[in-house]
Image (cartoon, rainbow, N blue to C red):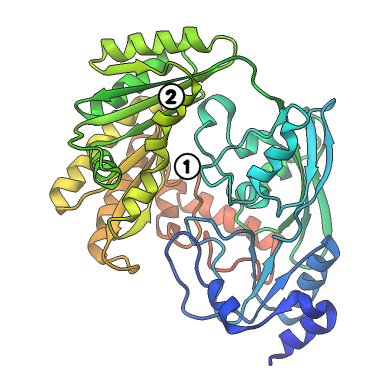
Amino acid sequence: MSDVVLLLRAAMGDLVVTDQETLDAMRSDKSGHRSDGAPLALVNARSVADVQAVMRIATKTATPVVTRGAGTGLAGGAIATGGEIVLSTLAMNRILQISADDALAVVEPGIINGDFNDALAKHGMWFVPDPASRAISTVGGNIATNAGGLLCAKYGVTRDSVLGLKVVLADGRLISVGRRTVKGVTGYDMTALMIGSEGTLGIIVEATVKLRQRTLGRVVTMSAHFDSVETAAAAATAIGVAGVQPAVMELIAESGMAALSSYLELGAVRGSQLLVQTDGAGAQAEADAALAIIRQCGGIGEIASDEEEGERLFAIRRSFHSAVASLGHVLIEDICVPRTRLAEMFAVIADIEHRYGIVIPTVAHAGDGNLHPNFILESPEVPPEIWAAADELFLAALRLGGTLTGEHGVGLLKRRWMTDELGADQLELQRSIKAVFDPLGILNPGKVF
């Protein structure tokens, strides 16, 4: 047993776990990537003091630390390897305060997003960030990656719902950034800096988040069929340009619909599907306007007769990842372009499919231009030709004014393209910021940079 593990056991007792099966599980996340070796130990922190104790030992011994929540990330950001400590905040899952009057809550990082919203529902409130993984992902993990989801075009990403954070630094100090007020411009915006930092600047141990009153009125859902994904994307753009603000607008491209057709035994399904959902007092009027635009763009659409039928329509979208996973190992990618360039991005994907002789089932959060192309692999190892295809896809997104990652983060998988998006000067500035917070380089080393 290493000296580091002995120090951890002396300070933390049975919160320190070293059995091989548990440590092996820390080598991977939902990205499909797996590290070369198991970490030294897993520490299941239960308090801020526990986190501080771990970081003091880590600093004293210059031992790398990987912070981990539920391990649902898709970029390899919470994967640990040999010589590292895994610091889990999953057991720090309390709701410390709900203030409906101030429209805020204070929570620990380990609380599951869906469980948090179940608790808020009793108060008539809602935490807006709604990633597809909300039933299994933590609020802390959502903040660490600035998670998105289906509702971002109307309600914003995680960053838009965070007021303040408590963060343990690499040397064990505890700082508070942000505030409980909506307004506040004292000094630099350290809260925004921490959001999406993927555990490279500090460990989030508490979050003060904005709440909304639960949306009143109907939820109206429609489904539309298009012969081509480019036409469907053009319709999605036209809906936004017309001023209609769907709560959800999802687009499944042809190859994705083919995978769903086979998986769900839907029969011969061709073309692409656009799903639109409106909510609030004006839901029906917005749905009618969106349907008119869809028909003008050549789509065949229908509005669900009630919310139950709407749920049935969305059941196909929710089966997308299971359908793709049934085809083999999957590299789930995540790019974002301005919504007016969505059709062009789909055309690029189709061209890459043709030239490389591969199928890339793709689904998009069409309201905000966020696409998830899926590469199907024969094994967890990504072959060079797939990385070459991905390289073309990423660079095309950048040329269209987009980004390498809309909501999954950089982690291990997209480090090589950082300079392409940020440029050498900005990347060096970001490395310098990292060095200020983490002079020993022990916070999630190898991730992002």
* Image quarter of the N terminus: bottom right
Q: Residues within 10 Å of mark 2 (few under 14, many from 20)?
A: some
Q: CA distance from mark 1 to mark 2?
A: 30 Å
Residue at the location (60% across, 48% down)? 196
| Nearest the eye: 421 or 47 | 47
Residue 338 at least partly seen: no
Q: Position of residue 13 (x, y in %)?
A: 81, 80
Give the mark toward the camera: 1 or 2. Answer: 2
| Nearest the eye: 130 or 173 | 130
Residue 333 versus residue 338 in the image, above or below: below
The picture quadrant where one finds residue 236 is top left
Q: Position of residue 262 (x, y in %)?
A: 24, 45
Amino acid marked by disc 2: Glu
Left or right, 329 with reference to 188? left
Residue 223 versus residue 281 in the image, above or below: below
**Residue contact at pointers 1 and 2, CB within 8 angstroms:** no
Q: Which residue is mark 2?
A: 309
Specify the farthest residue to the bottom. Answer: 1
The picture quadrant where one finds residue 217 is top right
Left or right, 333 with reference to 134? left
Left or right, 404 with reference to 379? right
Element type at mark 2: helix
| Nearest the eye: 114 or 252 | 114
Residue at the location (58% across, 53% down)? 429
Q: Which residue is mark 1?
A: 406
Give whichever of discs 1 and 2 has the lower sequence position: 2
Residue at the location (49% across, 62% down)? 76
